Amino acid sequence: MSDSTPVLFDRLGGTSAVAEIVQLMYERVLADPELAPFFEGASMERLRQMQYHFLASAFDGPAEYSGAELTKIHAGRGINAKHFAKFCGHFADVLDDREVDKRDINAALGRLAMFRDKITGDANVDG
Ligand code: HEM
């Protein structure tokens, strides 16, 4: 393609910006009484790293996610569509605070939405 539009990862600001976005997003998630209990006992340091790689890759950045499959990680935790929506809401708020272009916020939310069924277990039907 001769399209020179930067990929979403770069439009969000690249490596350091996306790392910061992940950090700020989990700060909000942990400050949310409905979401915080899910993360009790989780290693946040590791989670931030894994999430950085996952999102950087989902946003077409130069990263690969080599962790476990999302369905497996989130299964049996009781995460529902409302939790998922709140999680994405915190992500969107961080981007909004950084004055990311609305179209890019929507593009990023669209990428996250593709994983909803895996996170909430709604697609947990084998075969
Ligand atoms: C698009 C949305 C989401 C993505 C892309 C995502 C991705 C990930 C990734 C990459 C990990 C790290 C896995 C590892 O350590 O190997 C993880 C862990 C985790 N996720 Fe999510 N997640 C999402 C939404 C959520 C939501 C909505 C919740 C709960 C409200 C949640 C709860 C957790 C918990 C508790 C862990 C840590 C597991 C542990 O280390 O004990 N996630 N997620």
Image (spheres, grey):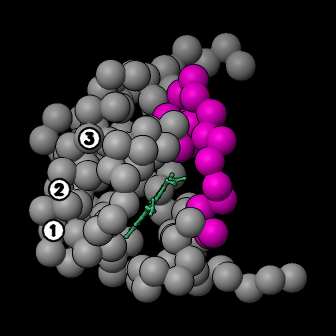
For the N terminus, the quadrant is top right
Residue that numbered label 3 is attached to: 23
Q: Position of residue 95 (x, y in %)?
A: 24, 42
Give the residue pinned by disc 2: 28
Alpha-carbon neighbours of circle 2 within 10 Å: few (<14), some, or many (≥20)? some
Q: Quadrant of ligand 1?
A: bottom left
* Label 1 or label 3, whichever comes before in sequence order: 3
Q: Residue furthest right?
A: 127
Q: Which residue is mark 1?
A: 32
Q: Amino acid at mark 3?
A: Gln
Residue 56 x/y as whole percent: 49, 35
Q: CA distance from mark 1 to mark 2?
A: 6 Å
Looking at the image, residue 63 lies above or below residue 27: above
- In front of the other: 102 or 45: 45
The kind of residue on which mark 2 rests is: Arg
Disc 1: CA contacts within 10 A as few (<14), some (14-19) or many (>=20): some
Q: CA distance from mark 3 to mark 2?
A: 9 Å
Q: Position of residue 81 (x, y in %)?
A: 41, 80
On the question of residue 119 being in view, the answer is yes
Indicate whether residue 9 is drawn in magenta: no
Location of residue 63 by image quarter: top right
Q: Is residue 103 visible?
A: no
Quadrant of residue 105 in the image?
top left
**Amino acid type at mark 1:** Asp
Q: Magenta residues, as a range?
A: 54-72
